[in-house]
Image (cartoon, helix red, strand yellow):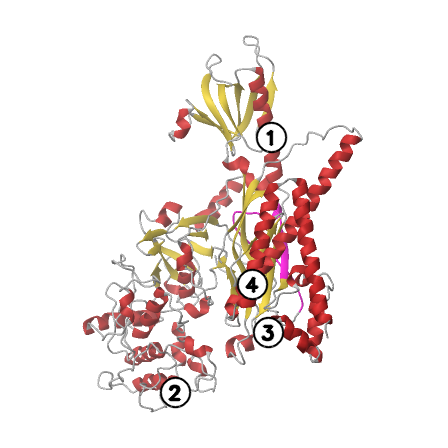
Amino acid sequence: MSFIPGQPVTAVVQRIEIRKLRQGEHLILGFSIGGGIDQDPGQNPFSEDKSDKGIYVTRVTPGGPAEVAGLMMGDKVMQVNGWDMTMVTHDQARKRLTKKNEDVVRLLVTRKSLEQAVRHSMM
Amino acid sequence: MDRYADMEDKLRILEDLNMMYIRQIALSLQDSDIQKKIDHEIRMRDGACKLLAACTQRDQALEASKSLLTCNTRIMAYMSELQRMKEAQVMQRVARRSSEAGPTDDRRPCKGKVAISDLRIPLMWKDTEYFKNKGELHRCAVFCLLQMGGEIHDTDMVMVDRTLTDICFDNTIVFNEASPGFDLRVELYSCSSEEDYSAGSTPRKLASKLSSSLGRSAGKKLRAAVDPGAGNRQTRWPALLVGGPKYHLLAHTSLSLAHVQDNFRTHDLITSEECTYWVPLYGSVCCRLAAQPDCMNQQMMSGCLKVKQLGGDPQSSTNVYGVLKGTNLSCYHRQEDIESNVEPAFTIAINKETRIRASEKDPDSNVQSISISNLYGGEEVTHTVSADSRQETHRWMEAFWQHFYDMSQWKQCCDDLMKIDLPSPRKAALVTSKQGSLYHEMVIDTAGDIGTVTDILTRRMQELELRSQLGTSPPWMSLFAESPGRQRSPRLAGHSPRTPRRLPRSPLSPSRCPRPSLLSSDASLTSDSDSPCSTSPCSRHGGLAEPLSLPSSRFRPRTLSLDAKLSTLRGRGYGGALQCSCQPPTSSLTPIPAQRVSQATLSCSSSTSSNSSSEGRRSPESLDSSPFSRPSSARRSLRSMRAKLDPRNWLQSQV
């Protein structure tokens, strides 16, 4: 999942639609993210390529909206509601997921197993 | 000279005649539906005109002008629909007279719902404009008009200035009676927010008196407005006589079935050239266009059936109640099961790969049956379905043919049911009127260890008029904080006018932080507030940290205390590699659920204003400043701040 600067990024993605859960006056999704272009990519335990500065899912709250929607730990988030997440800072990523006026977020995520599944199915 | 007054009169008469004409046609067609709609729009239009003439505030005028444009467009649409209907009526009469064959029995595809949402139009400012923030802030009011057939909807109005990176329209717009060949026209209208509207808003008598002494440019403008001109939308006949701000078409595009996808897509925009109302568009619009054909979410056919599976026991046929909906024929044991939400006994897929044909009459019952074949993972499975009577069988066949036709017309919309979210009414309360770009909305910690940040956050929570667009610099910006050269003492008491909510700060006591680098934080505090603030918008912005530009003359609002904080922490060189791990949210969470550090509170060492909303956790009354609390928690929040800024950490945020 590394990228070559200047070249388009291609990945096998899965669409995940998460409905935010309202807790009091807050909307939560039930997962944690790590990464960002302002973060040190070497510390990302989930990335294959240690120079990947993308946003990764580091934890999924059991039973939360994200788990229900099929999000898994270690997924790399490529897009949120049409906004790109491959070249954002950590805070920008957090903001895009936590907009108050959105009840639903539609993510495009990629994971290693997806690529493998596609490869196997083509064989 | 009276020629302007004359012209006005003539136009008014034409207007009235047109209105009468429309009403006449509507009446003659005896279509009370359209008549009512037209009357309604005309009334709305009159109201908007009156409001426009009466209002004094620019915002009101812009809103009224937008409603006016929408009303006009709707009236035009109804007019053309009326004309079409009239024509159709006439054609029908002609056809009957010439005794041609009756209308052919065309199969018509089912209608559906089309929804467009999350419209986003990226802007492309020149970097000199955007970053250096030079010159006056030109603002434009923009909104989108979405038209499909006779249905016209408008989005909310958004003010655009060069601090915005994208124009976002949060509305979700649903068109209910769309056919698969729909053409959704998206038009972006803009209006410069600083234009001089004097030409139109002066009362008539005065205008006629002034007309003789009109200057060249004003006269040209007036003449241009009155002259029907090149058929551009702006000079539509009903709008001519109304003053106030005028919207112009900035860009447009047409979307159709091919653009529908259960995903976000980018489409190209056709833009107009540079002029007063121009905004630098990147050239595309991103949106989510979803469609729900009726065949996917409504029952197309239902009735009692006998189902037999080929290859199974030839004698066993099950009596079921079948419902054709979407891509399935669901067979329930009893009809009542549908209401009681019981799962169907079994489901037969009806999709593009299904083959249906009528088979020969069953010798026993003398009724034709229908066989449905599907490929399930390489294996062909056939079900034989028979109804009670010949008419029933015929109806089922008809339903299947119609269903296949619908699926062929709606194409990709029939693969799966696309979700259309209708915005909940509650959302309206939460959405603020002003928009900022994401770049401006960054905060590092909502935990409130920095009083100003929490201050701002609380304000945001309350959605005060004085909406602060506080931003913090990304963590690496602290590397560029200015050198500890300035030795001004931190006296900030007098600088409230810019940020009225901030109280005089207690100066950083050197005793607490003995390191020399602290002075730089002091300096950053003071220098910021002391630097000249020339333009008014700054007073309303909380702070956008830009330490680099401080020495320059241009004042850029910033997080004073936050910057101090950054320098402070760096100075101390705290090496904790804390990861702000996610704690379960406590009772009342902060509005921006960033780092949920459980014990986050005010930091006493921060020299910021005392704001009681320590974690942003308290409710409205926390707006008034109350003194700092809990010095012990300061250390923890400090730790969390440091953890955030330490590049050795790999931050995680709970969302």
Marks 4 & 1, CB-CB < 8 Å contact = no
| Element class at badge 3 | loop
Marks 1 & 3, CB-CB < 8 Å contact = no
Q: Distance from label 2 to label 1 (Cα)?
A: 75 Å
User: Which sits in the foreground, A40 or B150?
Assistant: B150
Q: Nearer the viewer, mark 4 or mark 1?
A: 4
Q: Amino acid at mark 3?
A: Glu
Q: Distance from label 4 to label 1 (Cα)?
A: 51 Å
Determine crowd level at label 1: few under 14, some 14-19, many 20+ residues with C-alpha closer than 10 A. some
Of the 4 image quadrants, the one containing the N terminus of chain B is: bottom right
Q: Distance from label 2 to label 3 (Cα)?
A: 34 Å
Q: Are marks 4 and 3 on the same chain?
A: yes
Q: Please give the residue where the numbered disc 4 appears in the rendered image.
A: B50
Give the quadrant of residue B544.
Answer: bottom left
Q: Point out residue B78 in the picture as x, y percentages from the top left corner.
A: 64, 49
Q: Earlier in the sequence, mark 4 or mark 1?
A: 4
Q: Please give the residue where the numbered disc 3 appears in the rendered image.
A: B195
Give the chain letter at badge 2.
Answer: B
Q: Where residue A22 is drawn, which disc sits there?
A: none
Q: Are marks 4 and 1 on the same chain?
A: yes
| Element class at badge 1 | helix
Determine crowd level at label 3: few under 14, some 14-19, many 20+ residues with C-alpha closer than 10 A. few
Range shown magenta: B251-273
Q: Please give the residue where the numbered disc 1 appears in the rendered image.
A: B402
